[in-house]
Amino acid sequence: MSFVQTTRELLDGLGSAVFGRLASGEELTFNLAAEDQHYLRFNGGRVRQSTRVRQQRLAMRYQAQGRRVDFTFDLNGEVATDLDTTLSLLHRARVEASVLPEDAYLTVVEQVKRSDVHHEGCLPPLNELLAFIAEEGRSADFTGLYAGGTQLGATCNSRGLRHVFSTESFFVDYSLYTVNAAGENKAVKGLYAGRHWESGQFLENLRRSRERLSLLEGEGRVIEPGNYRVYFAPAAVDAIIALFSWGAVSYSAWKKGDSALMKLIEERVQLSPLFSLNENFALGLTPRFNSLGEVAPEIIPVIEQGRLCNLLINSRTAREYEVPGNAAEVGEGLRSPDMATGTLTDANVISALDTGLYIGNLHYLNWSDLQHARITGMTRYACFWVENGRIVAPIRDLRFDETLYRIFGTELEAVGATAEWIMRTDTYHQRSVGGSRVPGMLLRDFRFTL
Amino acid sequence: MTVSLAIEPKLTDFDPLAALTWIRPEADWLAIRYVHEKTYRRCARNGRPEENVMHLERGVMIEAMVDGQLAYAATSDLSREGVIQAARRAAGDARATANDRLAEFAPDWRPAVQGRQEVSGDAWLDSTSLAEFSDRLIQATQRLKVADDIVTAVAEAVLLETETRYVASHGTDVAQQFLMTWQHFGAIAQAGGETQSRSMNGPTARCVQGGMETFDWDALLDDCQRVGEQALELLQAENCPDEMLDLVLAPDQMLLQIHESIGHPLELDRILGDERNYAGWSFVKPEDFGRLQYGSPLMNVTFDPTLTGEFAAYAYDDGGTPATREYLIRDGRLLRGLGGLESQSRLGLPGVANFRSASWNRAPIDRMGNINLEPGSASMEEIMGSVRRGIYMEANRSWSIDDYRNKFQFGCEYARLIEDGRLTRVLKNPNYRGITVPFWQSLTAVGNVDSFKAYGTPYCGKGEPNQVIRVGHASPPCLFRAVQVFGGGA
């Protein structure tokens, strides 16, 4: 039996054995996260570490007597064994509920919906993958991570709600390195991700990466800190958009004084009419249900032509502040960001930039002044000095410190006509699902500080 | 009946040594690392309970060596069949990748050792009542809310019990036990369109090894009052000026400065390029060890897993290497990197016992442990007295550094101007930036042992697949000359 089938049976077996034992007034929700993955780490085109991970982690939320207790634990995989652990934790939850103070903001999922989605995939044969990367390693310095296998996320509760999402997929997240004419290390970033492995597509990705790498082989240009016109490629825009999920579009964070977009939310500032951002589950990259099993609207407009439309609101926040929720996840971050495209075609990017900096990727972004939506970070990978509509030289990396109000507001000159799909590659605790769709952006002025 | 904080769920028995005999035929050499960790997170906000969560992590990582190649397989299935299947997956992958390996496994990468480290004392979680502890957290939020302008007051405590056992087919058997806590007490103040946050040493810095004795509630509640009052002070404060000034960093900001600009660049796996696709490379080159003047002669930095109570103290790393205190930088000169036996062998350089993993489901890599700036001789009065005009900063709130660990920008919660050797006005939004080696070469005074304080973070991210790990950093306050400082605003 496949990992997906055994995991589903385990979840259903535990649910049917436990939910029936609840007393009146008790609510129990199971959220299962499982993966059967192969992680292969490469350096110099060779295997640095090969790690298989098979894990099934159950989160159970117990509510009764106006109290809530949460437990998460790793399952063995066999119903009888895991049932003992689950029941012992249920007993503990009841005990805790008898002594903890009352929680004023408990919520119950009223809509008992059900869904079941599985995406079958086709992963690369290991020997083929190794052969391609070894071959690549002979012509370019290949470093990166392959992750492939099955992921499953499921939520069910004692009221009969049940959602299951599983997928078989892979990514190769890589860098190709070279040394330029001045003896400096230079690199390009590549990503090949999907459900159905196609060797030809992977080789084409590598070929395009090598082509870009060749642009970096000339002597680098040292750019002094200061203000410049810039073009951000989609990967760089994606890194900035990711910061919106650090509290910026969270209703709860705003009410707690912890949102970077406070001025936008309170209509003290507007962003550019060129900037629109949706939470868009229609992209099909991530399930619409959250860890409680609440199903979000298919599309939630967040920013429409520079004006805030909606913040993300989970049910606890909705209860606390007495506002309607939109089935956001606990942290109220974007799960499927989709930024609207504009009119700047790929062919016109360099000429439209004219003289300034082409930024391929950004690195290590963080708020430098939350209240003014100011962020700092570094340029990374393929970044170039462009002069009179012509790429002149790769640059040495620069630090920036700039506000979102200028980036998506006063300095936004044009948005790319095509958007890139960027799959999530983060693997903390387990591999993430999801991704985003973002275009590039041209800015009139952007502040570099070091 | 009193309900204690401790939770004891019903679990199946698992004996790593017995499991090793189940899988012995599967490979030339095998090891099992078993991890059983309970993390309790209790949180209150604005006088109400916010979260009561317990995470139980339990599983094994199998290491299998075939044809000179080591591969890993992790599973939470601790049945005999589950462990055997994991061993077969690891052995199969070792065989399949042997011809493409980066480096051949050497037996001395996993020393044959037997050892135990146990937590002593009576500070376990079962000594404390759950109701009383929850009540203390709620009280803390009430003390943080010193005025109506405090819109958010949060008190959070994380308590951790960990057991690990590492056994290998050549006789290694290492068992370690840990008890840890970290705490966050923070307030957000809002008035007149201004918002400011203040916390006790920064949101994640108060990390120590220890149990319930680390909660001195009388002292903590008094300190909550100070935190709330300082949040209000910041609402009225001037912005940090934008100029080159002398900079005094408190130990709760030194932790971040050490972490980002010493710890990460000295990791040998970064220097080897393993991290280039994710966290980055390093400006440090192999030939710099023994030669590079990293900082001023006042700079002495150790890897110290032996400092009792510091967050990342341990007796053995996850490859079984006994952990000892070593100087990384002495009198400003770079001596040694942060790398376990695998990286030491690949580079031909000395390192330390820091081959560590986030949990049972990740393979070990080179990580920081406790990285400390050793105390100097200056009293706080002498440090301040040597500054005509400067800034004193406390508690990290922003951090960013490039992928070679050169150009950094850090921000703090709270600052005060130093004028003619005295602390004067409170300043808000303090930030500073610099470049690693010139910055450390500007180190002009190092506080004495009386001002030496240990902090840490539970959230150091690195590796592919990604891992977060716990690290400790101890330091006295330090003075740096002529640093670019600046404030907030658009």
Image (spheres, coloured by chain):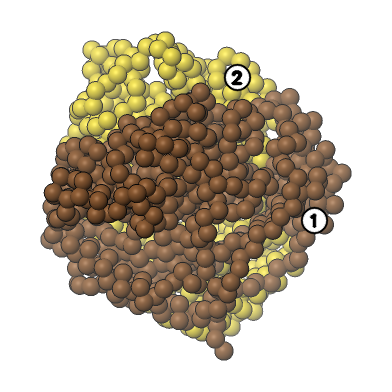
Chain colours: A yellow, B brown
A67 and A178: which is toward the camera: A178
In the rendered structure, the answer to whether residue A96 lies left or right of residue A224 reads right
Q: Chain of mark 2?
A: A
Q: Position of residue B171 (x, y in %)?
A: 80, 48
At a point 64% along the width and 37% down the height, the residue shown is B341
At a point 52% along the width and 69% down the height, the residue shown is B211
At a point 69% along the width and 25% down the height, the residue shown is B100
At a point 28% along the width and 16% down the height, the residue shown is A386
Instruction: Choose top left, top right, bottom left or bottom right for residue A400.
Output: top left
Q: Does residue A31 lie above or below B378 as drawn?
A: below
* Residue that badge 2 annotates: A137
- Label 1 amino acid? Leu
Determine the residue located farthest toward the front in the rendered image: B377
Q: Does residue A61 lie above or below B338 as drawn?
A: below
Neighbour tally class for label 1: few under 14, some 14-19, many 20 plus, Cα within 10 Å: some
B174 and B77: which is toward the camera: B174
* Residue that badge 1 annotates: B17
Residue A212 is at least partly visible in this image: no
- How many marks the image carries: the answer is 2
In the rendered structure, the answer to whether residue B112 lies left or right of residue A434 reads right
Q: Chain of mark 1?
A: B
